[in-house]
Image (cartoon, rainbow, N blue to C red):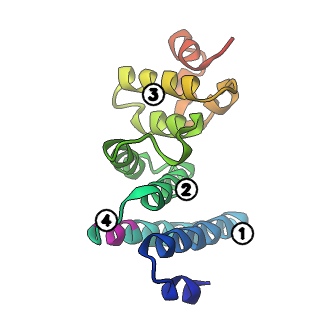
Amino acid sequence: MRAIADEVRDAGEAARLRGRILAWEIQLARARNDAARITAKLEEGLALLEELEKKGSSGRALSGYRHHLAHHLTQSGRHDLTLPILDANLAAGGGSHGDHGCTWMMHAASVWTRDRPRTLALLREARDRDPRDLTDDFRIGAFDDVQDDPEFLQAISRR
C-alpha cells in the first residue's frame, strides 16, 4: 500500500492514501492491544502532518488527514497534541472533516481542563451541527469529571 501511495503524483491524493494507511495501521495495533506500535504510528502520523504542512498542502485532503489523526490522538488521550491540529483546521476556514458533531466533540475534549467557556461553546456547536443527540458520545473519559454537570449536559443535549 505504501508503494502505491508513493507513486501517486497528485500530492493531495498521496496524502489521503498515506493518511488512510496510517489509520489502518493504528486500528490494527489497537486491535492487537499493542501500545508501543500505536505510539510509534501516532508519531509517524505527526511527522507526516508536519511534512504535508511544510510542503504547503491544503484543502480537503489536509483537513481530512488532520481530522483522522486528531481522532486517533484523542482515542489515546493525547489532547495536548490534538488541540493544535484541530485549531489549525478551524484557522484554515472550517471545522473539520465533514463538520459533523463528533468533530466538535473531539475539539471540546481537547480544550477541556484548560478553558471551560470554550469547551461549552464547542459542545453547543457539536449539538447544532449534528442532528443526533450526542449525550451518549459525551460520556467519554475526557469528560468524566463533568458527566453530571447541568451546564455541560444542557450544552450537548437535545432533550
Graded by Cα atoms within 10 Å as few (under 14), some (14 to 19) or many (20 or more), the crowding at tag 4 reads few
Q: CA distance from mark 3 to mark 2?
A: 19 Å
Residue drawn at the location 55% of the way across and 44% of the way down: 98
Residue under numbered circle 1: 32
Relative to 18, say whether 66 is above or below.
above
SS state under label 3: helix
| Residue 158 on the magenta segment | no
Residue under numbered circle 2: 72
**Residue 150 vs residue 33, the one in the foreground:** 150
Residue drawn at the location 62% of the way across and 29% of the way down: 130
Residue drawn at the location 49% of the way across and 58% of the way down: 69
The amino acid pointed to by label 3 is Leu
The amino acid pointed to by label 1 is Arg
Q: CA distance from mark 3 to mark 1?
A: 33 Å
Residue under numbered circle 4: 53
Residue under numbered circle 3: 122
For the C terminus, the quadrant is top right
